[in-house]
Image (tube, grey):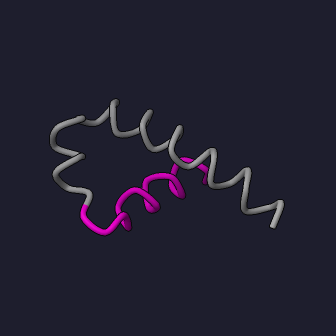
């Protein structure tokens, strides 16, 4: 799966940037299952 490798590596970097911009403490507490993080990353790409 060469397409999944690069996508996954970019997820954490993009998430951290978005989370740091919003609120490191509030965001970290809000992230439960990880769905919130995926939604944030998808919105950024769009």
User: Number of numbered discs present?
Assistant: 0
Q: Which is more toward the observer, 37 or 6?
A: 6
* Residue 3 lies in quadrant: bottom right
Describe residue 24's horizontal placement relative to residue 36 as left or right.
left
Q: Is residue 9 above or below residue 37?
A: above
Q: Residue furthest right?
A: 2
Q: Is residue 19 above or below residue 6?
A: above
Describe residue 9's horizontal placement relative to residue 14 as left or right.
right
Q: Is residue 41 magenta?
A: yes
Q: Main secondary structure of the magenta part?
A: helix
Describe residue 26's horizontal placement relative to residue 38 as left or right.
left
Q: Which is more toward the observer, 46 or 25?
A: 25
Query: The magenta stretch spans which residues?
Result: 32-46
Q: Where does the image place residue 33, in percent across and percent down from the top left? A: 31, 69
Residue placed at 50% from the left, 52% from the top? 41
Q: Where does the image place residue 35, in percent across and percent down from the top left? A: 38, 67
Residue placed at 62% from the left, 44% from the top? 10
Q: Where does the image place residue 16, in percent across and percent down from the top left? A: 42, 37
Residue placed at 73% from the left, 62% from the top? 4
Quarter of the picture containing the N terminus is bottom right
């Amino acid at each position: 799966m060469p397409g999944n490798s690069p996508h996954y590596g970019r997820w954490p970097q993009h998430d951290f940037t978005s989370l740091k911009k919003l609120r490191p403490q509030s965001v970290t507490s809000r992230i439960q299952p990880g769905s919130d993080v995926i939604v944030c990353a998808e919105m950024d790409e769009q």
